[in-house]
Structures are given as C-alpha cells and as structure tokens.
Amino acid sequence: MSTISEKILAEKSGKKNVEAGEIVEAEVDYVMLNDVTGLPAFEVFEEFQTKPKKEKIVLIPDHYVPNKDVASAEQAKAMRVFAEKYGIKNYFEIGKGGVCHQLMIEEGFVTPGRLIIGADSHTCSYGALGAFATGVGSTEAAAVMATGRLWFKVPETQKYTIEGKLGKYVMGKDIILTIIGDIGVDGALYKTMEFYGTAISSLPLSDRITIANMAIEAGGKAGIIPADEKVFDYLNGRVKGTYKAVYSDPDAAYSEKLEYNAEEIVPTVAKPFLPENTAPASELGSIEIDQAYLGSCTNGRIEDLRMAAEILKGKRIKEGVRMIVVPASKAVFEQAMEEGLLKVFMDADAYVAGPTCGACLGGYMGVLAKGEVCVSSTNRNFVGRMGDKESKVYLASPAVVAASALTGRITDPNELR
C-alpha cells in the first residue's frame, strides 16, 4: 500500500496510485520564490510568453533584505517589479513578512496533503504539517509559474520512530542532528523521511518544523510528519482554502525503518564542516566561541526564542562573545516583544535584528571573520557557510546556543542547572 508521498503525488497527478521510482507530472498547489532565486526564475518565465498562474505564486524577499548592497537591491527590485507587472497578490514586502519558510506556514499556504515546491532547498520544512514539499531550481520554479505543473520522481520512503520522553533541554534540533549523525548527509538521498512516535507527537509544531527543515541535510527529498490535532488547531483561522490530511497505510512499503529511544537523545552539536559530524554538547566544552546566533527558518520561532530567553534571563553574555537574535518573521518579532523576550535578550547584551535570513547563508548581519567560531541554530555548517572559509560553525539547538553565549564555550544547558 502507499506512503504519504505516494498518496499526495498520486492525487496531484490524477492517478489512483503511484510507486516509488515512477515519473509523474503533477499539479502543484504553490510555488515559492525568494529574492535570490526569483530573478533567474523570472527570466526563464518570460521565455514561456504566457501569463503566470499567479494564484499559485508566492514571492518572499528574505535572503538579503533589508538590502545590503546594490546587487541585492537589484534582486529585490526584480521581485517587486515582477509582482507589480503580473498582479501577484502573494508578495510579502519587507516590513510585512520574514523568512520565506516561516511565512509560508504562518500565512496558511501550507496544509496537510498539499504539493508545494520552493526555489529554496529548505522548502521541505512544510512536511511538518503533513504536506509533500521540496526544493527545486529556479528553472523548475519558472515552469510551474507558467504551467502550474511539474514532473516528479516518486521517492522511496524511510520510517523513523522516536519513542519515549525527551530530556530537559532536548529539542527537535537534537533529534534531527542525532539522526543525521547516524545516517550521514546522504543517508536519505532522494527519499522521504517520515517521522513517528510519542516523542514526535509530543513536540510543538515549531520543533517538528525544525526536523522537517533539515531532512535536506540528510539528502532527503522531503521530510514529513503526519498531521494531528496540533496541526489542525494551528491552521484553524489561518488556512487558505480547504485541505484533507493524508496518512500512510499501515502496510505501506518503507525502504528502511529506524527506531530511537528518546531518553537516549541528548543536546547535540554538529561540528564543522558537515551536519553529520555530530557529538554531544557535553563533550565539546573546551571549544570557545566568538559568536552565538539564534534564528533562521530552522530555529527562529517563538518557542525557540522562549527557550533561549529562559536560559538567559537575569544573566549576561560572556565578555568577548557576541550574540545575535533574529526572529523568523514579523509575527514572531511582535510576539517576542509582547512577551518581554526581546528585553531579556537586550538586557543580556544580545543584539536583536528584524526578520531576515542574514548570516545563515553568510549574507550579512553576523558574517564571520577569519578564524572565528560560531555556535548557531541554523541548518548548515559547510566551509565558508557563514563567512570566511577559515571560520567555523557548530550547529546546535536554541538551548545550547543560549547556554554557550553565557559561558563563552559550547555548553550543554544542563550544566547550568
């Protein structure tokens, strides 16, 4: 029988069922582009010489906004001009939006059962709500803008089950880093990762998004968590259109099945220069840091900020360390402000910025100099990812990032209790 991916791709391609490895042409619900991937997509789209499927298009400038230089200003302008030229209503200007993946979810574009593509690799985040979502190139995005359809190779599916109760300060980031550390950055190559178990169902939506977000870091085509009441409650009042949740059949065929005991998962860090290079935070206490970064589509949600603020409240960041906090959207920023979290950060001497991708991709707002070390809640730690090629990035949860900012070295937050 069928997995979630197979069921969604079958429905969207008008078939009764499909099998892993099959090539299908499917109707896409939404295509998302940002300021970096938009410009080349717009150029390809014009070659179609047709009107865009504008109800399916979502344009979100986020990588280099507010613009850091003339080149990034031109990228953002191209998106603004395209939106105006074709009357694209789903365009989120600076001051109204935030990081693209957070906004796609907040604004109700993402629902269970939908097929969504984005010209950004972390589009797989949307699988946290039971959608099939994957990143594509700008050319493929342009094709969907013109036709509303795209071809897909139906992926095989892996099943991950995490049972039990997570320990103090153990977050979704620790779960996915633990898995990637086990299977490697190609352990789910062109496969869907489905996540189950009591540890997953107990997680807030925020942590589930983190897990789905980093499926791509294991080579995954998609990362999907079956929708439950937490998802339905979140979508109530915000969803665009109607939707129907999709679930794998009990006898669905999986390429692999892996099981984890939640009690054995600890605060985990990915060392340079790959997300698979993991170790317990408690074993890395000798590594001193220059910067602690909290934000991104991976960990810039209100729950992430609350966790960090809980650890930082009434304390000061260690002298010689800088901490940068970047809420993932305007809505997250406003909520953090209302809850007093921003004051906690600023009282601790952290720098708080408006929503942007910023330093995650080495753009700006926290780029690293030669030899500097950063512990970051982002999703990649490749050579030169956040700055100079001789800088180093350690990936960690918001809890580890906050604890490390206080001590000036990579720290398991349980050490501070």
Image (cartoon, helix red, strand yellow):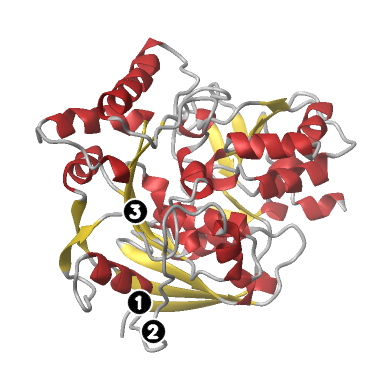
Q: Name the kind of residue labelled 1 in the image.
A: Thr
Q: Are marks 2 and 1 in contact (CB under 8 Å)?
A: yes
Please state, as top left, top right, bottom left or bottom right, where the N terminus lies in the image: bottom left
- Calculate the distance from the C-alpha at mark 2 to the C-alpha at mark 1: 6 Å
- Calculate the distance from the C-alpha at mark 2 to the C-alpha at mark 3: 22 Å
In front of the other: 324 or 278: 324
What element does badge 1 sit on? loop
- Calculate the distance from the C-alpha at mark 3 to the C-alpha at mark 1: 17 Å
In front of the other: 229 or 86: 86
Q: Quadrant of residue 6?
A: bottom left
Q: Is residue 405 left or right of residue 236?
A: right
Residue 3 badge: 1
Q: From the viewer's perspective, is residue 209 above or below residue 340?
A: below
Q: Name the kind of residue labelled 3 in the image.
A: Ile
Pointer 3: what residue? 116
Count all numbered tags in the image, as a single digit.
3
From where the camera sits, is residue 214 visible? Answer: no
Q: Quadrant of residue 253?
A: bottom left
Q: Are marks 3 and 1 in contact (CB under 8 Å)?
A: no
From where the camera sits, is residue 251 visible? Answer: yes
Q: How dense is the environment of label 2, judged by Cα within 10 Å: few (below 14), some, or many (20 and up)?
A: few
Location of residue 267 in the rendering, given as x and y in whole percent from the top left corner:
68, 57
Mark 2 or mark 3: name the one nearer the start of the chain: 3
In front of the other: 6 or 147: 147
Location of residue 92 in the rendering, given as x and y in whole percent from the top left corner:
45, 32
Pointer 2: what residue? 249
Which residue appears at 51% of the width and 60% of the height?
181
Location of residue 154 in the rendering, given as x and y in whole percent from the top left corner:
24, 67
What element does badge 3 sit on? strand
